[in-house]
Amino acid sequence: MADRGASALSLPEDWPAHPDPILALNRMGSFDWDLDAGLMDMDAQAFEVFDLLPEEYDGRAESLTARVPQAEAARLDAVVAQAIKDGSENYGAYFRIRRRDGTMRWTHTQGYIRRDESGRPRRVVGIVRDATQELADSAARSLRAAQDQAFRQQTSVVQVISAALAHARSVQDVIDVLKDTHGVRHLGAASLVMGLVEAGRIRLVAEGPVGSFVPGTRVTRIDEPYPMSEVVRTLTPRFIESPDEFEADYPILWPHITDLHITSAAYLPLIAQARPIGAMGLLYDDRRGFSDEERAVLVALGSSIAQSLMRARLYEQEKDLAQGLQQAMLPRTIPSVRGADVAVRYRSAALGRDIGGDWYDLIPLPGGRVGAVIGDVQGHDTHAAAVMGQLRIVLRAYAAEGHTPATVMARASVFLHELDTDRFATCVYAEADLATGVVQMVRAGHIDPLIRDSDGSCARIPVEGGLPLGLSAEFGRLEYPVATLELDPGHTLLLCTDGLVEQPGADLDDGMGGLVAVVCQGPHEVRELADRLIQLAEARGGDDDVALLLLRRRAREATRTGGRLQQHVAPADPEALVQARHMIRAAVRGWGARDQADEIELVADELVTNALLHTEGSAIVTLRVLEGADRRLRIEVEDPSSALPRRRDAGENGVSGRGLLLVDRLADSWGVEARGGGKAVWCEFRLPCPADG
């Protein structure tokens, strides 16, 4: 794009007759203007151009009015605004500044406009340089014609810098930008060498072309006689204009690079925050010497790359810190579970400190049971990760205390609500008895689980859920319905966070349908299946983390004894009573008492019904296998009433009073135990011994 405003300029009457060419040459700096934040970062050379001290500048472009007269600022703003409006990629303009001593100097700026996918301008990256000498030349017209080519080169350089600044997330990203066909070759160089300062030494991080590595230079001391060491020591660029000069000044290095046919080289210190972070060398095989303009462009290039590298290193450090925090909040190891194959995976889509609150957990429970958890705390930052860690720990503690799944979820919601945070969390908690295959599951605003059969077919399991954790406590809706399902031998339970299924602009149901199809076609082994799903998530990308937990019940463990199950039954909740019956029926079959299933289910139903009819609270049904001289199935029904039950004669036409008589007749033994402010009515049935093997 042609420079707007330059052709109409005329030199002022007070223009100095003999400006200092050295001063003009050294004054070239770079800037990075964040249009959204309204902040403009400048390097040290840019401060020299504006004759400003760093402490005099607060990062806002408006602060430059101390040096840029109002009329000049208005004209410059018009040039930038027009370039943004008409969709241009770059702009150029001359303007005058008033130095500290009152003299006026001409300055030239070249900017490259970075836009997002919608075309909205986000950043401007460019250079500013002292143009006094250029415009003061008596042959200004011919000089401007010659400068057009230099300006085009500067625009290309700015594009390279802009690409590095806009996309670089790591040091390697910056190197890749400089080494591709739009980088080093675009600058006219044959090869690139770059090193970073670490602990008083220079570590080589890039060199090319392939095969050009010089032995003994992978790590060098700053005091060694190499050009990169020299520019780091002196903080001054080094331009080598001929092979003879290279050989004379660096006799140790030269014999190793003669095969590259180097004719000249430019070594630049990479300086950020007033200290050297490394050095870069550009080696040429088709030129000798550097013009003043070329030297100025390369110095500005080195300054911009240094800032880009510093940001990339800080980004890598922040990302490592954030991921370390997140990993510390997740379980370090997953315990082996007898009777099941388990696989967990986690994929972070973190950008710097923007990490998520996804988590998984596997909780060994008494009686051969296991709790499986998947959850996601709202937000993508270190606070979300910290809340996730606390929530994971308390949920594990509540489960280990023996609470029912609904109680575990309700207490976790109250805990999150009482934290000093505005975050909520979605979660699924599944408590599985691997002896019976009975799974009791509660859902708090999370996506549904999947179950894959042993034949490879897969289905989404609708689970009636409650509000997300934190919100249910805030709105006083702590009820979490318990869904009871059976996990047959060879079946796999799949829990995941929405990062695995959600895509921008796509329906969640479509995403779940796609996941079902992938699981159906996936490997049978759970670890291989988990790897396949994470690979698909990686290939798809996205800005959300993914947590995944797979649990497959082994067929050979199906007859193992032991276990404990618990179900909460609320008053006037027929569905909960149905679920309790379902749990009892499945447990009895799984524990080898299929022939006694009808009697046991009938007795348990009588105890639950009595608790609901004759007390004002809910009932908690607990089933467990007691091992000893003989195996017994124990049923406990706990209620909040301290009034003891008693057997009554129902009479000839009575419809009540038969419950305890039935219990006494069918159970091998029964009784009542005090439990705090309430009681538990229990009964036991002898079970057949399991077959050997």
Image (cartoon, grey):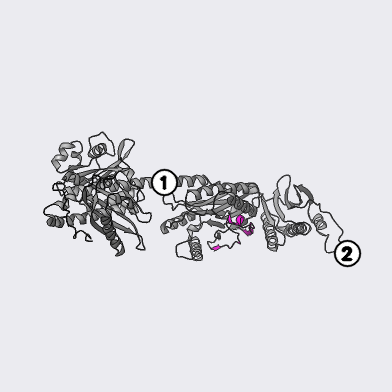
Please, what is the dominant secondary structure of the magenta stretch? loop
Who is closer to the viewer here, 289 or 106? 106
* C-alpha distance separating marks 2 and 1: 80 Å
Quarter of the picture containing the N terminus is bottom left
Residue 297 is marked as: none
Residue type indicated by callout 1 = Glu
Label 1: which residue?
Answer: 318
Residue type indicated by callout 2 = Glu
Above or below, comparing residue 504 to residue 620 in the picture: below
Report helix, strand or loop for mark 2. Answer: loop
**Residue 637 location, x and y as percent?**
74, 53
Q: Which of disc 1 and disc 2 is earlier in sequence?
A: 1
Above or below, comparing residue 650 to residue 302 in the picture: below
- Does 560 sit left or right of 214 as displayed? right
Q: Quadrant of residue 651?
A: bottom right
**Residue 395 location, x and y as percent?**
59, 49
Say which residue appears at 69% left-offset and 58% top-offset. Answer: 580
Residue density around tag 1, few if under 14, some if 14–19, many if 20 or more, within 10 Å: some
Task: Confirm whether the magenta stretch covers residue 482.
Answer: yes
Query: Residue pushed farthest left?
Result: 139
- Does 592 sit left or right of 322 as displayed? right
Query: Can residue 358 be seen from the camera position used here?
Result: yes
**Residue 535 location, x and y as percent?**
44, 56
Query: Residue pushed farthest right?
Result: 652
Which range is magenta?
458-486
Above or below, comparing residue 337 to residue 7 in the picture: above
Label 2: which residue?
Answer: 652
Report helix, strand or loop for mark 1. Answer: helix
Q: Quadrant of residue 593?
A: bottom right
Q: Are marks 2 and 1 in contact (CB under 8 Å)?
A: no
Who is closer to the viewer here, 365 or 375? 375
**Residue 577 location, x and y as percent?**
70, 60
